Image: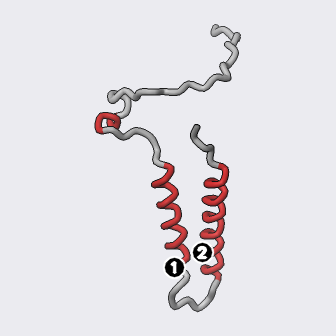
Amino acid sequence: MAATDLDKASTERAVATSVDPAEVPSAAWGWSGESRKAARIAAWVVVVALLGMTIGNHQGHVEDIFLVGLAGLMALLLVVDSLTQRVPK
């Protein structure tokens, strides 16, 4: 039977300063991780694309409500994200 005792979790965060190319193949050519800037740019492109889809020969405008609503929600999330981003020291 396995033991039921658990070790206390550490509240310290581990920070990796180097990445092993064996674990992350892209580290061999100098890239590892996510690019927040590229993700934000891509999200703004999606917002513009959603708003661009409202132009057309629509008979009803129910789809326009969804397109504008989703674009507005995404824009709001992007603005909140940029305002609450931690400033590097």
Residue shown at 66% from the left, 19% from the top: 10
Quarter of the figure with residue 76: bottom right
Which quadrant holds residue 66?
A: bottom right
Q: Secondary structure at mark 2?
A: helix
Q: Residue furthest left?
A: 29
Q: Is residue 71 above or below residue 24?
A: below
Tell me which amino acid carries mark 1: Met
Q: Is residue 34 above or below residue 24?
A: below
Q: Residue at x 64, y 23 (%)?
A: 12
Q: Residues within 10 Å of mark 1 (few under 14, many from 20)?
A: few
The first of marks 2 and 1 along the sequence is 1
Inter-mark Cα distance, 2 to 1: 7 Å
Res 38 label: none
Residue at the disc numbered 2: 67
In front: 31, or 70? 31
* Residue 88 image point, x, y percent: 57, 40
Is residue 50 found left or right of 22 in the rendered image?
Answer: right
Q: Residue at x 58, y 91 (%)?
A: 59
Q: Quadrant of the C terminus?
A: top right
Q: Residue furthest front?
A: 89
Say which element carries label 1: loop
What residue would you read off at disc 1?
A: 53
Which quarter shows the N terminus? top right
Q: Is residue 41 above or below residue 52?
A: above
Residue 41 in the image: x percent, y percent?
A: 48, 60
Would you say the residues marked 2 and 1 are in contact, meaning their CB atoms lie under 8 Å apart?
Answer: yes
The x, y position of residue 83, in whole percent, is 66, 54
Viewer-proximal residue among 2 and 89: 89
